Amino acid sequence: MDLTIYFTGMMMGLSLIVAIGAQNAFVLRQGLRNEYVFAVCLSCALSDAILIVLGVASLQQIVGVLPWLDPVMRYGGAAFLVWYGARSLLSALRGFGALEVRDGTPASFAGTMAMCLALTWLNPHVYLDTVVLLGTVATRFPGHQFAFAAGATTGSFLFFFSLGYGATRLGPVFSRPSSWRILEAGIACVMWLIAFELLSGI
């Protein structure tokens, strides 16, 4: 394996996923609540790995065979993000008790994982970053595409586990209901901004 290409893939992968987004905001929230952190981080990282390999291996074929995929992802993903943003804003406005980081009623494991997978697989930005952008960059390294993919996958694992477990250290800050409400309102704004970008074609 060419280590230079491997580390190029890692840096490229990190640069694409480090910005806050729907998926990252959810991982942050779970880390702050200290709920199912390992499962959520692993699910996000494995999903990224699958999409990265898919993009590196078959980007050209996907675009040719499924020309309808772009509008479906754009409008379906935007609708989901609008709903999730409204859910977060409602949570911010409801009151103090429901917004405690550690004392609130934990969500079920099945519900948490379903939300995690939806935020990953229904988010067009995830496909843009992993399948399209990383798949395109990998074509610059003929014969070494999978070294690039391995590096990008490593970057994804490093990022999600660092975000999830790093957030647990911020628990004391977000144990104050006001801080948690601000976070929920911020998450709502992020979701709606991404949805707007999708619908406006930015």
Image (cartoon, rainbow, N blue to C red):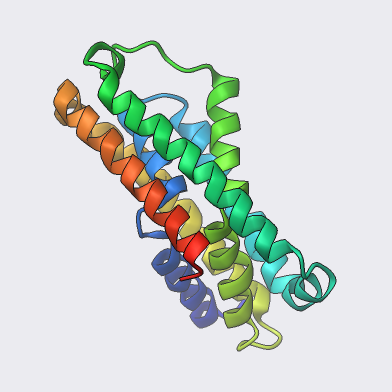
| Number of numbered tags placed on the structure image | 0
Residue 173 at x, y percent in the picture:
15, 30
The answer to which image quadrant residue 170 occupies is top left
The answer to which image quadrant residue 53 occupies is bottom right
Residue at 53%, 27% (x, y): give it. 112
Residue 8 horizontal side relative to residue 183, left or right: right
Residue 13 horizontal side relative to residue 93, left or right: right
In depth, the one of 15 and 91 nearer the eye is 91
Residue 159 horizontal side relative to residue 40, left or right: left
Residue 28 at x, y percent in the picture:
35, 39
The answer to which image quadrant residue 144 occupies is bottom right
Furthest residue to the front?
200
Residue 5 at x, y percent in the picture:
53, 80
Residue at 29%, 32% (x, y): give it. 168
Residue 39 at x, y percent in the picture:
53, 32
Residue 33 visible in the displayed image: no
In the displayed structure, 144 sits above or below 167; it is below
In depth, the one of 13 and 201 nearer the eye is 201
Q: Quadrant of the N terminus?
A: bottom right
In the displayed structure, 109 sits above or below 18; it is above
Residue 62 horizontal side relative to residue 73, left or right: right
Residue 168 visible in the displayed image: yes
Residue at 39%, 10% (x, y): give it. 105
In the displayed structure, 166 sits above or below 5; it is above
Residue at 23%, 28% (x, y): give it. 180
